[in-house]
Amino acid sequence: MTRRVLAVLAIALAGLARFGGVAEAHSGPPFPIVQDRIAGAYRVSIWTDPDTTDDGKAAGQFWVVLEAADGTRTIPAATLVTVAIRPLDRDGPAREDRGEPVNHVVTRQFAALLMDHEGPFGVRVTVDGPLGRASVESQVDATYDLRPARGLIALYLLPFALVGGLWVKALLRRRSRDRR
């Protein structure tokens, strides 16, 4: 029985070590800041995950979803999307990035920008293509990712693991005592 328990614990720890990085890679669910806004010949939606970083990493993520405003045409492959941000609460540089099609689908584009402090940022998405030029503006509040580091999560789980270990140890002792 002890070998089985140890094997299960070893497999669980190996799974945590193997898949722990997958959870760390995502910093929270994106949310819409613009939904189905008509601009020129386009219907534009903007989703964002506005994470602030101190290390210069472009963690402010934006997904732009395009449709033809009339719903009858398809968006041509030559359509370009540009996402630009600027701080609203202080002086700072405006930054922009050209959107890249997600999975080679021109109607879904992704851009990542550096948001170097917490606070409100103005967001401007410009669409330029064979159907014409259009732009949509909005704003978003950038924040730090407030989840604890992976090492701290392990520390927070340690008391529960210790109590679980004591419980298993007590069950094993009771079982060996009952066999006598």
Image (tube, rainbow, N blue to C red):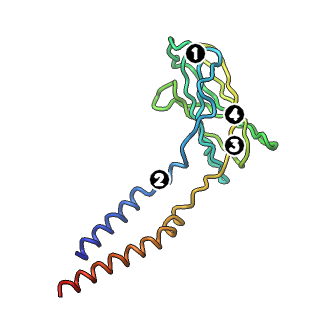
Residue shown at 59%/24% (left/top)?
36
Gap in Å between the C-alphas at discs 2 and 3? Answer: 24 Å
Amino acid on which the number 3 mark rests in the picture: Asp
Gap in Å between the C-alphas at discs 2 and 4? Answer: 28 Å
N-term-proximal mark, 3 vs 4: 4
Crowding near the residue tagged with mark 3, few <14, some 14–19, many ≥20 C-alpha atoms within 10 Å = some
Residue 169 left/right relative to 41: left
Q: Disc number at residue 179?
A: none
- SS of the residue under disc 1: loop
* Residue 9: percent from left, percent from top: 33, 68
| Residue linked to disc 2 | 23
The quadrant in which residue 95 appears is: top right
* Residue 12: percent from left, percent from top: 34, 64
Amino acid on which the number 2 mark rests in the picture: Ala
| Residue linked to disc 4 | 123
Residue 159 to residue 61: above or below: below
Q: Nearer the viewer, mark 2 or mark 1?
A: 1
Total labels drawn: 4
Gap in Å between the C-alphas at discs 4 and 1? Answer: 21 Å
Q: Disc number at residue 69?
A: 1
